[in-house]
Image: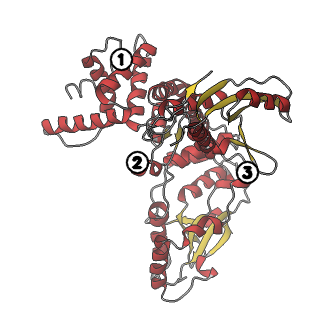
Amino acid sequence: MPESKTYYFYLWQHRFLDESDRIIARTCFGITSNPQHRIQGYEGHVGHVVRFERLWTGPERLIRELENRVKSDFYDHIVTGTNGFRYEWIREDVDFDSVVAWTEWEVANTFQGIESVS
Amino acid sequence: MSTQTRSVNRGANPYAPMAKQANQRLTPQHSNSVYQTIAQRAGPFHQSDTIQNSVKILAARMGGEKFTQEHFGELVLVPISLLDINVDIQRDPENEHQGKIIERFDPRIAMPVMATRLKNDRYSAWEGQQTSCVLYHLLQAGLIDENFLVQVKAFDEDLEVPGSDLKGEAVGNYGFRQINGGMRKPIDAFHLHRSRVNGVRLYDSDFDEDEQSEEIQQILEANNMFPAKASAAKYNQATPGMVTYIHGLNLIAGHGLDMKGFGRAKQDLEWALRWHDRYYPNEKGVDGGFILAFGRLHHAARVSDPEIVLDRAVEDDLYELFRAKYGSPKAFHNDCKQRLKTFQTRNNLNDSWSDSCLAPILVMDYINWGGKLALPQVPGMMIYAGI
């Protein structure tokens, strides 16, 4: 099997005001081969500095599988947009710490080739 | 970078939002999703063997005939003075039961009385005696308008229907035991719990029984657990956080006590479930015997004089005991069953399970294991000594 590229799985939180002026905090997740480039992409969209609060690295295959598991396990909690498109955001009914704990557990119990960067 | 082999035999991730999803399903968030037509509800089962076999049996009994509207009798409004109770069919009037109905009486949930219309134009009530008596008490007390008429579902005593030789009071005699026995299935603990929780969450109920169940539900949610039907855990289908022993939750939390007593007893449940969530979050289901044992242990500690506090050091020690002796809460329960059985066989006693041995065995095992921290005396330690 050919060697896999180094990839990253990241988690960060974004807070915004909903229509009732409540503060909503949602978890964004994703994978990239270049975290800095991806951060700049987010900053361009949201208009403020973004920091990946948690970052893991490992072979692309494992990182992609980890992301697939997030999408599967949190399927009912993924943010759905205007046309029913499911985005890589987890709704506020699952708190950020739970997603981090979930990921740490997966990494510890399944993905031996992935390690935490921050 | 090379990839390493990963294990796939690892159990469920305890942090997956499974419990959250199950708890969300307990209380629907959108009222438009709670209604199904009868066709939607019954349709999927219509072709099942169970339904089709039963339909065949009934059809054979009816000999090719059909039930008509008349066969169902009619709904009529009747002065209460025209109601008679056939004392050969009905059970005794139950004063206490009627008192409870009166306390919670709501005319919208009063059921029609089932009756046979006799040839003398009086109505023999063969089902709904307690309701009829309650209506009488309320009329006498002036809590119901004096012109009130009782809703009665009645059929004439000479009415015959396909597939039955019964007529008149014989139908009442048959209906009495069918409605009160075989045909009416008691609500299982899960659906009763759900009804009570949603009584508060959806319908603003302030009945103690509903508020207590809602608080029990909060305790489950705080510990990443969710209630489920007993059938959900069959065939090794239990998942982390699943609790099917709802009766045990209610028992330990003091459901049914006054609110003050409940407020104290629910601490026992909180402690037991928190311990499970801390040390065994990945167990497939929360064992019912564990809930009883730990709940009773905490109760005994709480009512000890002076009170014994089961602090973090005790919790850690109990976890070490479990690691050393049992392996898991379920294994502890199974071990107790096996030891009680052996004890009964050895002493020529009848072989029967009693969950009252759980907490005593837990405490005695802790002491024999070498535990040094203070645990309370629990009821039954003398009975089950040496088990």
Q: Is disc 1 placed on a helix, strand or loop?
A: loop
Q: Nearer the viewer, residue A56 or B314?
A: A56
Indicate the quadrant containing the N terminus of chain B: top left, top right, bottom left or bottom right: top right
- Farthest residue in the front direction? A2
Query: Which numbered marker is on residue B376?
Result: 1
Q: Report the residue marked by disc 3.
A: B31
Q: Position of residue B222 (x, y in %)?
A: 58, 30
On the image, the x and y values in percent for residue B55 come to: 49, 77
* Quadrant of res A49: top right
Q: Chain of mark 3?
A: B
Q: Quadrant of residue A55?
A: top right
Label 2 or label 1, whichever comes before in sequence order: 2
- Asked whether the viewer can see residue B155, the reply is yes
Q: Work out whether residue A93 or residue B370 is closer to the camera in this orientation and state it.
A: A93
* Residue B114 picture location, percent across and down: 57, 67
Question: Looking at the picture, which amino acid does disc 1 mark?
Answer: Pro
For disc 2, the marked residue is B236
**Sequence-first disc among 2 and 3:** 3
Specify whether B227 is left or right of B364.
Answer: right
Instruction: Check disc 2 and give the amino acid type.
Output: Asn
B140 vs B224: above or below: below
Cα separation between marks 2 and 1: 35 Å
Distance of label 1 from label 3 (alpha carbons): 48 Å
Report in which chain the residue with disc 2 lies: B
Q: Nearer the viewer, residue B26 or A104?
A: A104
Whether residue B31 is situated above or below residue B216 in the rendered picture: below
Residue located 35% across and 20% down the image: B320
